[in-house]
Image: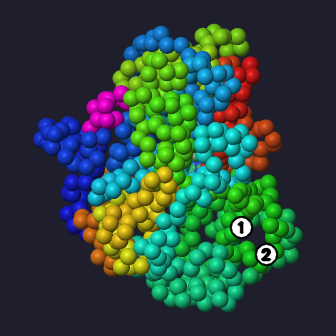
Amino acid sequence: MNDKSLGMDRPITRRDFLNGVAIGVGGAVSADVLRQIPGVEAILNAAAADQDTPGYYPPALTGMRGSHDGSFDVSHALRDRRFWTNAGQPSETGETYDLVVAGGGISGLAAAYFYRARTGPSARILILDNHDDFGGHAKRNEFRPKGRLWIANGGTQSIESPFPYSREARALMSAIGIEPVALADAAEKAAHREVFQGLQRAHFFDAETFGADRLVVGSPAPGRGRGDEARKSWEAFLAKTPLAPDVQKDIARLESASVDYMPGLSNDEKKDRLSRISYKAFLLDYVKVQPGVIPFYQVRTHGLYGIGIDAVGALECWGMDYPGFAGMNLDPRATGRMSFTARGEATPKPPYDFHFPDGNASIARLLVRALVPDALPGRTAEDSVLARADYGKLDRAQSPVRIRLGCTVARVRHTGPASSAREVDVTYARGKEVYTVRAKGVVLACWNMMIPYLCPELPEKQQEALRYGVKVPLVYTSVALNNWRAFKKLGISGASTPGMYHTGARLEVPTVIGGYDPTPASPDDSILVRMTRTPCKPGLPARDQQRAGHVELFTTTFETFERKIRDQLARVLQDGGFDPARDIDAITVNRWPHGYAYEYNPLWDPDWPVGQAPCEIGRKPFGRITIANSDAGAAAYSDIAIDQAFRAVNELVGR
Ligand SMILES: Cc1cc2nc3c(=O)[nH]c(=O)nc-3n(C[C@H](O)[C@H](O)[C@H](O)COP(=O)(O)OP(=O)(O)OC[C@H]3O[C@@H](n4cnc5c(N)ncnc54)[C@H](O)[C@@H]3O)c2cc1C
């Protein structure tokens, strides 16, 4: 389809209005005209000034979000050793704090919370974050297609983790009003509403990967069982696909047979071997499937690992109940040579899995309410769902806790020798200015790989450890539609698209809670479509795949994303009559080049002795500076971010 048919010229809240470009379009369009376009008001306000500007409300921004333009320039200048040559002399603000926190994600906000809980409500705390919104990866997106409010998670989605939340994490959640089990009971599952009944899962096979564009409705559910019944249901599904007959046969065999592919080995020997080969190698070398089977499974690990089955161990996939292991008689207990995630997947799950409409942005928002009460009106977790945060209240001189956005910490230095200094100077850049504040203690709740640039005095071994992990890049895209008649006509709730730019697209089924209920009455009403992309590069070692993904995401324009999104939805929904030019109202691409914390992958990382993993060496306290963030726990989960904050504050306050 050409750009016009795709709707690239349609006046949605889109690339032209981002990054201040609209404001600089040679004055061709006045701000008054732009303001008439839904959603642009917030963009203009955000672009014009900082968090104190009336109307400043980043959740309503659309276009390129997540690590938005302007949020990473200072960090990259520090990395490239350009920052200090170009930066002016820091201005002394004269501000002094008990605690300064670098990073306003869940870990940084939790650190402020724990510090106050330990030292009292008068503790003066400053939280600095480089983004235009607080929450780190836990971000809220809002849309108003056809005037109806839709809320979505821009990153972190669920209150669930491979292991139960720690006592400290549970206590914090409870103190800010989050009881996941009770909330899950209170929330209505809109999926049960009649309007969604009868919709099925589907697969879309794209011509570039599978030889022909074809939508196949009614994908068998994963883990549907083994044996004849499973085989028949797979055969029926596969017969409708463009896959070659021998590939179809192998998939049906893999999904339904119970075979021991490593006969003669003990349980421990099998598990050890499975932990040292990728799932792809297991399929090719042990199950002996045709190479044409691989593209069907390649991206299945993307959601949890950010890489494909070429780089994820077969034992991890056993832990997650992937096909091929039913006949291998493996002891169901997890072993040491599994990542945090897979070990947890192989153990009984905690009794909660709840997500707010904005995901764990609600944890961040409720922490903000606890720290700066009048910045988020209301009293309960439920009433917070529709509460509008007042960003103008986040950084006021009279408030003991202040949250300052758009500020990248560039240097953290004790005022004397680290072993005896009583204070730390924190220098940060905001816009073109550089400022210094002073604190009795600092928690670095920012990303591990940034810390050596901020704190070059750290021992070399610690810096090296902090640089080890490579954060996992991910993209969470939301597309607001004016209607979803095409989905209804095709009878699908979404489609796996394993060969395409985004590897899946599904209708958002809202969590109905706290007065929030955008559930459409009919397919003529608006809805959100959720899509994910994981920019890995199959064939490379895991960390190199992630590095390549960083580059890709930082160099891909919103326009490219938009074109790919429009084209993909047009192809998948073609037979349903979808018109991308007519049906799309807004697009938000949450780009997370530095996404998940790096989790150790037994396929690529050594078996470190206890206490010697890079995250353990990297998080050691240094004078009055301690280190939080999920990177410090090498696990990409909200509870880990909270646990690391608890430890970092204890190290500081315990002095
Ligand atoms: C797309 C995505 C989906 C996820 N889904 C889930 C989920 O469903 N459930 C779950 O439990 N976990 C999930 N996670 C993981 C979870 O988001 C994280 O574990 C948790 O939110 C991390 O919080 P944090 O505060 O440690 O780090 P972050 O959220 O990364 O916050 C750190 C903040 O520090 C800022 N920063 C970095 N350097 C500086 C500096 N020099 N100066 C100032 N600020 C700086 C960063 O920009 C960021 O805003 C997901 C993560 C991603 C990326």
Q: Which residues are the magenta region?
A: 43-56
Q: Tell whether position 52 is magenta.
A: yes
What x and y, as percent, mark residue 270? 81, 68
Residue 540: which quarter of the image?
bottom right
Outermost residue on the left side: it is: 28
Q: Residue at x 74, y 77 (%)?
A: 326
The image quadrant where one finds the C terminus is top right
What x and y, as percent, mark residue 427? 49, 19
Q: Is residue 561 left or right of residue 533?
A: left
Count of numbered marks: 2
Q: Observer-nearest residue: 297 or 437?
A: 437
Q: Is mark 2 within 8 Å of ligand 1?
A: no
Q: Are marks 1 and 2 in contact (CB under 8 Å)?
A: yes
Please rate how many residues cluster around mark 1, counting C-alpha atoms within 10 Å: few if below 14, some from 14 to 19, many from 20: many
Q: Tell whether position 525 is magenta.
A: no
Q: Is residue 185 left or right of residue 489?
A: right
What x and y, as percent, mark residue 453? 55, 27
Residue bearing mark 2: 328
Q: Observer-nearest residue: 577 or 56?
A: 56
Q: Secondary structure at mark 2?
A: loop
Residue 291 numbered mark, or none: none
Answer with mark 1 or mark 2, whichever residue precedes in sequence: 1
Residue bearing mark 1: 318
Q: Residue at x 25, y 49 (%)?
A: 38
Q: Residue at x 54, y 58 (%)?
A: 187
Report the amino acid beneath label 1. Trp
